[in-house]
Amino acid sequence: MGERAEKILIVDDAQFMRYTIKKILAKFGFDNICEAENVENALKVYQAETPDLVTMDITMPGESGIEGLKQIKQINPQARVIMVSAASQKDKVIEALTLGAKHFIVKPFTEDNLIATIDKVLKM
């Protein structure tokens, strides 16, 4: 599988989830990956790295992923953000899509689902 040039920012308070997403991305040729464990750090990394795509967990300590989405969209209205949520968060997913998220992934997800969603959003 060829190398992918796109830069991706993974935002999740769970180190295991960041590791899991990063491992899947690496398997599919993505090696330009940034991470943040909360919204505050995500905003710093976003401004410094200008990633092509962000995966944003909805539920995190401190500011939620919804708040992070709002702030990233203020920095860059064209930002491509995929929300990552538990199945029980349907209302939050709808809110995120209304606020400009490009797509969402429900945990637990498969490798194929994650990569298909990322590829779809990168083509938007």
Image (cartoon, rainbow, N blue to C red):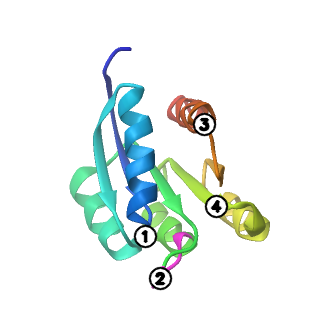
Q: Amino acid at mark 2?
A: Pro
Number of callouts in the render? 4
**Label 4 sits on residue:** 85
Q: Residues within 10 Å of mark 4 (few under 14, many from 20)?
A: many
Magenta residue span: 61-65
Q: Amino acid at mark 4?
A: Ser
71 to 123, vertically: above or below = below
State the mark number for residue 106.
Answer: none
Tell me the CA gap for discs 2 and 3: 26 Å
Residue farthest along the front direction in this orientation: 16
The image quadrant that residue 74 belongs to is bottom left
4 to 34, vertically: above or below = above
Verify CB contact (< 8 Å) between mark 2 and mark 4: no
**Label 1 sits on residue:** 13
Identified at 47% across, 70% down, the residue is 68
Verify CB contact (< 8 Å) between mark 1 and mark 2: yes
Residue in front for this viewpoint, 109 or 72: 109
Residue farthest along the left direction in this orientation: 48
Residue in front for this viewpoint, 13 or 94: 13
